[in-house]
Image: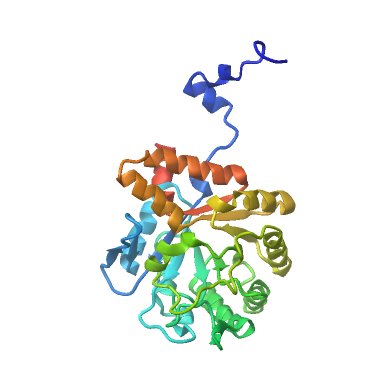
Amino acid sequence: MAFPVNRPRRLRRNETLRRMVRETRLAPDDLVLPLFVCPGRGVKREVTSMPGVAQMSVDNIIAEAHETFAAGVPAVILFGLPERKDNIGSEAWNDDGEVQRAIREIKERVPSLAVITDVCMCEYTDHGHCGVVREGDVDNDATLELLVREALSHARAGADIVAPSDMMDGRVGAIRDALDENGFQQVAIMAYSAKFASAFYGPFREAADSAPQFGDRRSYQMDPPNGDEAIREVMYDLEEGADIVMVKPALAYLDLIWRVKQEFGVPVAAYNVSGEFSMIRAAGINGWLDEKRATLEVLTSIKRAGADLILTYFAKDVARALSG
């Protein structure tokens, strides 16, 4: 039937009716908060391109973990800034490194908070690339061994989930085999399966001190126009043992979040990345838009596209808003 019998506005006329027929519901349980762990004590150094986000020493990370869990966010993902860097990123698998210390402290003090760890070399190498560099490019197979060492170190410290973000071919299988062989069958893998060479990562590179010192990452991160290739990448990671797959960034790739969910029906994560965060935060600070409304609209769109988990720097604020 058509108008005037059909009047969709009937169910939009007040907030109670709108809530009753709402199709997509964003909840605190959907969110993961990224945290940047740095050396020292009492350190909380704001990232200038990401107002409200800071590099923090382990003691402040623990305080943040308590606040995050109290707000209703179930998980954090840790990125490390090491004391020193070298050409292979050896601090990544230092069992006394900042990330490893943070994992142990969180699991002791906030045991119900799930801890995910970024597994990559870019924060730890002096050249800023995601693995072993030979002849100006990252050597895929030589890098796998380093990623395995890092993942095992995180597992020993107590990580619930390891998240390889490097985009090396075969890394999920190598990490899965190593975890299983070393008694960590219960540690899950969240693979950055479709990670694109995006312009939206700029602020993160300040936050993680991970900008490449030469060239770029387009020989290993995906070419933004390629959707079918993203589906193949997800398929490969699932075949190798990934428990959760990720699309990164989120906003420019909502179609791929949808395709991955429809094609595979597995847990899908999406990363609402630093550039997406900074655009909204800057516009809110300048009064160009309502930050709270814009944030909820963006995160709801990511959930509506099919994401089960959303990694976002807005996680704590949004969880409080949703629970308030």
Where is the C terminus found, in terms of image quarters? top left
Where is the N terminus found, in terms of image quarters? top right
Q: Is residue 9 above or below residue 235?
A: above
List x then y, in percent, for residue 100: 44, 74
Residue at screen point 27% across, 68% down: 43
- Tell me if I can see residue 254 in this picture: yes
Q: Is residue 61 above or below residue 4?
A: below
List x then y, in percent, for residue 101: 40, 73
Name which quarter of the figure residue 194 lies in: bottom right
Residue at screen point 50% across, 67% down: 117
List x then y, in percent, for residue 29: 52, 47
Q: Is residue 63 above or below residue 254?
A: below
Residue at screen point 56% across, 88% down: 134
Name which quarter of the figure residue 235 lies in: bottom right
List x then y, in percent, for residue 143: 58, 82
Name which quarter of the figure residue 242 lies in: bottom right
Q: Is residue 88 left or right of residue 71?
A: right
Q: Residue furthest bottom?
A: 135
Q: Residue furthest left?
A: 42
Q: Is residue 174 left or right of residue 218?
A: right
Q: Nearer the viewer, residue 201 or 35?
A: 201
Q: Nearer the viewer, residue 110 or 45?
A: 45
- Tell me if I can see residue 27 in this picture: no
Residue at screen point 54% across, 85% down: 136
Q: How is the image coloured?
A: rainbow
